[in-house]
Amino acid sequence: MKTAKEKPFYLQQLERTFENRVKINPKYSLRAFARDLRFSAPRLSMLFREKFGLSRASAKQVCEQLKYDAQTEALFLDSVDSHHHRSPKERESARIRLLNRRRIFNSLDLDLFSIIADSHHFAIMELLRIKELSEGDFKEIAESLGITSIEAKVAIERLLALKLIYKTETDRLSPSGSFLTKSQTPSSAIRKHHRQLIKKATDSIEAQEIDSRELRTLTLAIGREDLPEFSKLFDEFQKQVRNLAEKNQNKDGVYAWTMQFFDLIERKDP
């Protein structure tokens, strides 16, 4: 059975932006959104219904009006070009760039992350890269990841509803991309996610052979004013790890990379 076509990334991003504004101000309307984009309301409505597309110039204007960060803007523009550029060659080039960018990472907003904070959601998305599985294979997924069948079934339904995975024309489940959260906002969901993965890392010390895991620590004195530079370094390394993983097309394992960088000195509140 043929499934519904996935909406282009740029439309998904516009819809997310609009929905987030409505959450902040329930009176915020599609007409107000059109005004903020410098569009007419009918034009925006037709855009959402995929009755017409965007030019690169219009897409650039949208990104500027909505103040998207550099990465989101690059994804947005590539998505527009991959669907609407006049040149077939440029459409294909943009499609490949978009695929590569989305594989490196997609940022999840905090509201969405809180829904899938349990670590097995991310593990399922990666498992689908190495196994041909359908929605009915939740028992095999549960057995592979050491979770209950109910947890696997509910997680699949949730990921499908959030469009983080989708069904192919052959009903195989496939991830929409690779995801992480960049939010530095304190969050119980993010804390929960990290606790789960750190526990799994702790369990692996006894449960896994040394040649199937990497656990390393480094203790060092630093200047605390350098913390932003360390954060940039860790971000870059995370991208390198993702890029290396994507190079191998014969994937046969799902690994978690966790990193902790924290103060060992117990400091009393002033």
Image: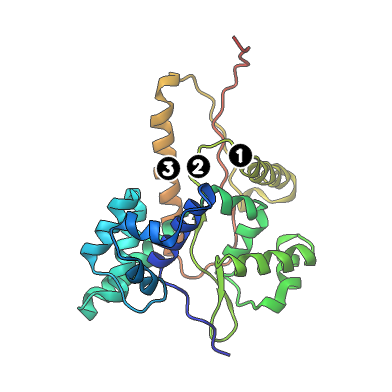
| Disc 1 target residue | 187
Identified at 41% across, 30% down, the residue is 228
Q: Return the x and y of residue 190 as percentages of the image width and height.
A: 61, 43
Q: Quadrant of the image for the N terminus?
A: bottom right
Q: Quadrant of the image for the C terminus?
A: top right
Q: Is residue 179 toward the left or the right of residue 117 in the image?
A: left
Quadrant in the picture for residue 151: bottom right
Which residue is nearer to you in this view: 247 or 266? Answer: 266
In the rendered view, tell whether residue 193 sits above or below residue 46.
above
Q: What's the amino acid at mark 1? A: Ser
Separation of residues labelled 1 and 3 (CA atoms): 20 Å
Which disc, if any, is residue 183?
2
Q: Nearer the viewer, mark 2 or mark 3?
A: 2
| Residues at circles 2 and 1 in contact by the CB criterion of under 8 Å | yes
Q: Return the x and y of residue 116 as percentages of the image width and height.
A: 63, 55
Q: N-terminal of the two: label 2 or label 3?
A: 2
Identified at 29% across, 63% down, the residue is 39
Q: Is residue 188 visible?
A: yes
| Disc 3 target residue | 235
Q: Nearer the viewer, mark 1 or mark 3?
A: 1
Quadrant in the picture for residue 227: top left
Q: N-terminal of the two: label 1 or label 3?
A: 1
Q: What's the amino acid at mark 3? A: Asp
Q: What's the amino acid at mark 2? A: Ser
Q: Return the x and y of residue 122 as percentages of the image width and height.
A: 60, 58
